Amino acid sequence: MMEDVLKQIFRYDGFRDGQRQIVESVLDGHDTVAILPTGGGKSICYQLPSYLQTTGLTLIVSPLLSLIEDQVMQIKRRGERSVAKLTSLESRDQKDHILRHLNQLRYLYLSPEQLAVPQIQQRLADIKINLFVVDEAHCISQWGHEFRTEYAKLGSIRKQLGNPTCLALTATATNQVEQDIIQGLALTQPNRIRHSVNRPEIQLIVEQTEQNEKDAVLKRRLKTTNRPCVIYTTTRKEAERIAAFVPQAAYYHAGLEPEDRQLIQQQFLHDEIDCLVCTSAFGMGVDKGNVRTVIHYTMPATIEAYMQEIGRAGRDGQPSTAVLLYAPGDPQLQQFLADKQYASLLWIDQVTQSRGQGESFESIEQRLHLEPDDPAYRLLKSQLKEGKTKSQIIDWQENRKKIRLRELMQMINYIQNTFCRRAFILEHFGEKPVVQDRCCDNCGTLTVDEPVIEVDVNQLDWKRRLEEVFFSSRPSV
Amino acid sequence: MEKTIVRQIVLEAISRLQNERTDRSLFHLIQGKRSATSLQDAHFYGLEAIFGMVPLKKDRFEQLLQELEHAGWIEREQTLMITDAGRAQITSPFLLDDLGGELRGYPMQLWKRISLLIQSIVCLDQNTFFIPIQQDSGIKEWVRQQIRQIPERSVWITAVYQELNKALHQLTERDAILISYRLSGQKTGLSFPQLSERLGTDLLSLQLEFVMAWRRCLRALPEDGLILSLGNDIDHFKMTQSAKKTWELLKQGYSVQQIAERRRLKKSTMEDHLVEIAMYATAFPLEQFVTAIQYEEVVRVSDQLQTFSLKRIKQELTQEMDYFQIRIVLARKVDRP
């Protein structure tokens, strides 16, 4: 029965590791926590059960617009029309229309912000919800690297919706984070399905150098690793600078015009460019199977983030490589960036005082020149709205900073550690070490690629180009 | 200092402002702020084409002015002024007249529609996966509707290709490159940073060049052709919505007083609307507001002094007139295209 649906609707011949277990658990009405590595076929786990139930809605909470867009598009492409999304991109009219036709839907994707809207909750409370899916569930944990305040409300919202069966999904979670997910979503005796975070097809390399040597090291690396290749940087400027000297590379970051961003993603997916230099803004929801190499020009702030980013390599299961460049000074940069996400003591002082005197947020923003979109300020504002006092906020922030510092230390340990890197990561996630070929630079069983980099020397020629845009399958004249 | 396209365009705009407006006025103009003053500035000083067409943030705009000042091309006091050295940099014809601001959002709106429609139809026809290059949900919805109405995809593709190919032949090599390399279908368009690297132009200038190229392309396309017909319903009226309502009532024969009461408009708002109507409408009941003699005198003074400064004109007038009356005259005086 399940296999029939898998084949007819999703066009897969068989389940991948863990998928069947998760689907069965959910169909039995058990709350479920599933930890599947990136590219492990998460979406099947919550999209399939719906076809084995006669009525009811599958509600999916996801933190990223691009991810939601991507999923909805994929569902529609396989011919399923009864899917909708509620995000900041929909107009009022579109939202009204969706809310009036909820009972005709199979899937509804929501951002956590939209789910927090009382009218939307009211409408949802009136209909039957089969499954309450929380994607990227690690965002609920204050111990996790991507804590989001809106996720903290999901537990109580789920209760208001009549406690539908819940499926919490994430790619990476330590035992601590898993506990937070269970508590935060108020899951009752959940089935816990965990798959190894190990990605055996990716060999792990760390290369230590000096700041002024990094570019040279990067260039050398690019000569011994295959493309398509993703190079992660910490800042937009750095992405632009590196793309300028790497042959056949383009940069991608959130500062690009929306149209340019789409163009670059599409070029990369279509193999029209084979090296992308980007900030962490790239990646979520971009499903490209043949990425051969992921290089980090600067270390990420946590091991979880690192695993997620290198997880973009080798989704097709073919041999791939992850390289992390490290130079003294990198951790300080990360710490600086982390601290910037929290309001300074001066701000907290000024804003709490003004609020105490009954001043509106808008007036405070204007008077103190605060950017309403600044994440540090937004966080402060939402905490004040929740009624937190000044000392509570300061304590909470100090605590957060400590957690982040500890996470950064773990990342440094990964780099400095002289034993097997894979074993280090597995241990971090509470798993046992494995022995394999192409493991890591410390184990010394690496393979070296000899990439062929094709340089496009063609002159710009609009006549040829126009033809290629409209009919590329026709040979150019 | 190198004379880039963005510098040249800003320089042209400053020269047209005749040393009568501030840097803030210019910023609002290029931002396309639909306030009475900015609309009036665009109309009086021949800067409709630049209205809302230069995507500059405040700090980048400030930096640009500083560069021009540093090069000795402009001076900044109360008002913005072009120097002789700056004037020497300007060559005719002016670049800015091709930006298309007089059509308000129309050219870029049509670009978004046509670029996404071409990408969608070509990829659907070939059954290839694609990421929609436009994310605007209104545009996507419009494209979805259109796709349903196209019976034969391959016929449509060939027809649009031929139309574009013909139009691009009438443009310069460079304009044709800018447009063809931004389009996506079987091949994906280049981002502006990629194009600016290939063409060796700074990013902002390149973006402006693209806008101008597309404007010229629209002129080269057949008026009854497939592409232009896709933009027939795009609003390109210059008048603001609110002024338009006032105009409708005026045409129905209501008096200014009645309209003000009915719409609960303040006197100053009502006047702003009337100036807008005088600027953009083909017919306007001028005699309701000024006499023929008053009209003649304002036109004469403005021409003599070569100015649109209301203050200077008022000082020279022999008869008593208020600022609103002078604005109305100036609004009608300027040639309408």
Image: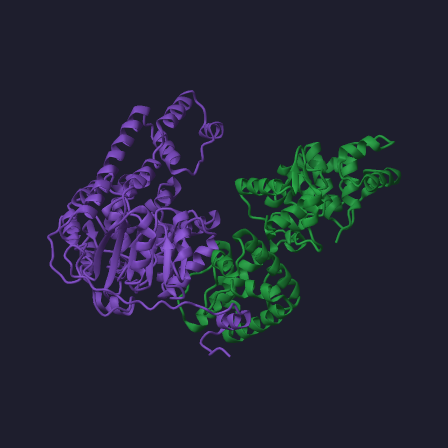
Chain colours: A purple, B green
Give the image quarter of residue B32.
top right
Image point (46%, 79%), residue name:
A475
Image point (19%, 46%), residue name:
A416
**Which residue is more in the foreground, A336 or A392?**
A336
Q: Is residue A121 visible?
A: yes
Q: Position of residue B290 (x, y in %)?
A: 83, 38
Give the image quarter of residue A339.
top left
Above/below status of A342 relative to B138: above
Report whether A451 appears left or right of B194: left
Q: Is residue B246 visible?
A: no
Q: Residue furthest top?
A: A357
Report the label total: 0
**Which residue is more in the foreground, A280 or B237?**
A280
Q: Residue furthest right?
A: B293
Give the image quarter of residue B294.
top right
Above/below status of A196 relative to B329: below
Q: Position of residue A425 (x, y in %)?
A: 17, 50
**Which residue is more in the foreground, B131 or A33?**
B131
Above/below status of A117 relative to B139: above
Report whether B19 appears left or right of A290: right
Q: Position of residue B262 (x, y in %)?
A: 69, 37
Q: Position of residue A442 (x, y in %)?
A: 16, 54
Q: Which quarter of the rendered picture does the N terminus of chain A lie within? A: bottom left
